[in-house]
Image (cartoon, rainbow, N blue to C red):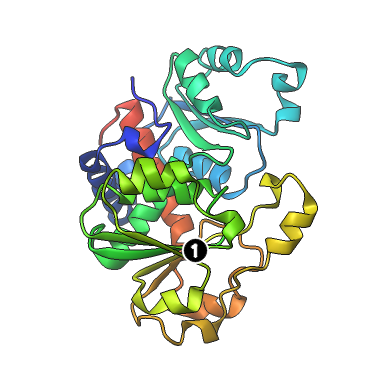
Amino acid sequence: MRNLIDIRDLSTTEIDELIAVANDIIANPGKYSEVCRGKKLATLFFEPSTRTRLSFEAAMYELGGNVLSVAGGNSSSAAKGESVADTAKTVSCYADIIAMRHPKEGAPLVASMNASIPVINAGDGGHNHPTQTLADLLTISREKGRLGNLTVGFCGDLKFGRTVHSLIAALSRYTGIKIVLISPTELRVPDYIKAEVMEKNAIPYEETTDLLSAMPELDILYMTRVQRERFFNEEDYLRLKDSYILTPDKLIGAKEDLSILHPLPRVNEIAVAIDNDPRACYFKQVFNGKIMRMALIMKLLEVTV
């Protein structure tokens, strides 16, 4: 039985295989419409979510399966003090696979150690978000035709941004990757990401506070919002929330084939005027997320067409 807690639980070969399946789903959706008939996905979301929860549920329905859903800790026995371990054991009696989002880092790992069915980490605190990373990788692959030999800029909240941490970990295993980290000093990537991921894998990287100076060299610009829910005090959030706002004038020096990604939700860090720019890929990411979750559910349930 396999789980997906960290993107590094998948080898690059497995990621390439998931991308191949995803591309086939896009090309031949009818072929996959019944492969999970009789299977049930439990979505356990103890933190607010729109895209990720609906994406998982849409993925399972489009595979012909069914969904059991818990949205918000207040509507589950967690509100009564039930442990994550007990919840996982209980839900294992009802479903065939679990997708869990939790505000506490490590909660999906605890669930996976206690469940008797596969567990997918749908986001744990500021730690990991591996299925968003799969969506990102499919988007990059479809836009660029490759996952290596790219200069990738991450901009915004790099301290608490779990999507950033997961994507850096994934890209660090491909050749020819250079990473540019663009953030306020207070929101820099954690030292453990630098040491255990980029430096350990000899990935060249630079840190800067200046988006405009970094723009001309980027193949990918990954924007993120400053996350109010991760801050301990409102004052710091208000001071930093508008640090980087991408507007059309800031793209003047960018490559013609730049791909602009964002895990969403967007607050105000990308101007709506960017949406019509052919380089904007963030709504493509939403679609690709559903497709990659379909491929992942199939893999973990060991179902084939």
The answer to whether one can see residue 144 in this image is yes
Up the image or down, 168 lies above or below 103; here it is below
Q: How many numbered dots are placed on residues in this image?
A: 1
Please give left or right for residue 305 compared with residue 228 in the image: left
Please give left or right for residue 138 compared with residue 108 in the image: left
Where, by quadrant of the figure, is residue 78 drawn? top right
Q: Amino acid at mark 1?
A: Phe
Q: Position of residue 173 (x, y in %)?
A: 26, 47
Where, by quadrant of the figure, is residue 241 drawn? bottom right
Q: Position of residue 152 (x, y in %)?
A: 36, 63
Quadrant holding the C terminus: top left
Q: Position of residue 285 (x, y in %)?
A: 44, 58
Secondary structure under badge 1? helix
Q: Residue at x 41, y 42 (%)?
A: 293
The answer to whether one can see residue 33 in this image is no
Of 107 and 214, nearer the camera is 214
Residue at the spot of label 1: 283
Please give left or right for residue 192 compared with residue 91 in the image: left
Q: Residue at x 75, y 61 (%)?
A: 238
Of 305 and 194, nearer the camera is 194
Of 233 and 91, nearer the camera is 233
Up the image or down, 100 lies above or below 175; here it is above
| Mark 1: few/some/many CA within 10 Å (<14, 14-19, 20+) | some
